[in-house]
Every structure is written in structure tokens, then in C-alpha cells.
Amino acid sequence: MQVRDLIERWEEASAEPLTVRKYCIQLPVQDAARIEALVQLYPRRRIEDILRDLISAALDEVEAAFPYRQGPKVISEDDQGDPIFEDAGPASRFRELTARFAEELEAQAGSRHD
């Protein structure tokens, strides 16, 4: 999701699964004011929804911005038969860590509902 997609999303309902873990942060005054302005612009959306969506969009953009670093292993070939090498940059590690933590967080959520 990109930041520009959020406005459309805020017009709709959302039912994504949530973790049991909560994150508490303090914001710079200007950022907090902008969050409050968004809450006023989209009164059907709770502040938690807006913050969640902004963080999600920012994380998508961070992942997309990670540089590609060619690894030593060929993982496939393109349409012209040229080798495609594995990504040895931070994006690959980020995805691995994300999958690991997603499993852990889902397990925690499941154990709270049992």
C-alpha cells in the first residue's frame, strides 16, 4: 500500500487481524497536529486506524526503497536467458525477519484466544 492509497482506504471499513502487542509512542508536535487534522478530515476513522494505516504504508515504502545487492546464487533466468541473481541486500533479510516475527505475533494472538 502506498500513502496515496490511504485516502481511498479511509473511506472504507477495515477488518485486518491485529496483534495483541501495543506500541506506545510520543510524536513531535507538528506530526501530532497532522494526525489530529486527519482525524477531523476522516471522522469515520479512529485515530488508531489512521496511525496503523500510515505506519503500514510507510513500511511498504521502506521495504521498496531497500537497495538490491546481487548475491552469488542464480535463482532463475529472465526472458532472454540472462541469469537473475538472489538479492543479498537488506530487503531479503527484512522479509525473512518479517515472516519470523509474523509467526511469533500470530502465535501470541492465538494463545490469548485459547
Image: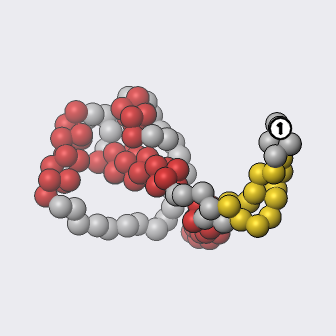
For label 1, the residue is 80
User: Which residue is at the far right?
Assistant: 81
Give whichever of 51, 81 is nearer the camera. Answer: 81
Position in image of residue 76 (x %, y %): 83, 51
- Quadrant position of residue 46: top left
Looking at the image, which residue is at 19% across and 37% down? 40
Visible in this render: residue 12?
yes
Looking at the image, which residue is at 60% across and 57% down? 68
- Quadrant position of residue 70: bottom right
Position in image of residue 105 (x %, y %): 58, 67
37 horizontally vs 109: left or right: left
Give whichever of 85, 63 is nearer the camera. Answer: 85
Position in image of residue 86 (x %, y %): 73, 60
Q: Type of residue at label 1?
A: Gln
Within-10-Å neighbours for mark 1: few <14, some 14–19, many 20+: few
Q: How many marks?
A: 1
Q: 14 above or below 18?
A: above
Visible in this render: residue 114?
no
Give whichever of 103, 108 is nearer the camera. Answer: 103
Colouring scheme applied when the structure was drawn: secondary structure
Q: 56 above or below 38?
A: below
Element at label 1: loop
77 horizontally vs 38: left or right: right
Looking at the image, which residue is at 66% across and 66% down? 88
Give whichever of 65, 29 is nearer the camera. Answer: 65
The quadrant the C terminus occupies is bottom right
Q: 92 above or below 59?
A: below
Position in image of residue 10 (x %, y %): 37, 34
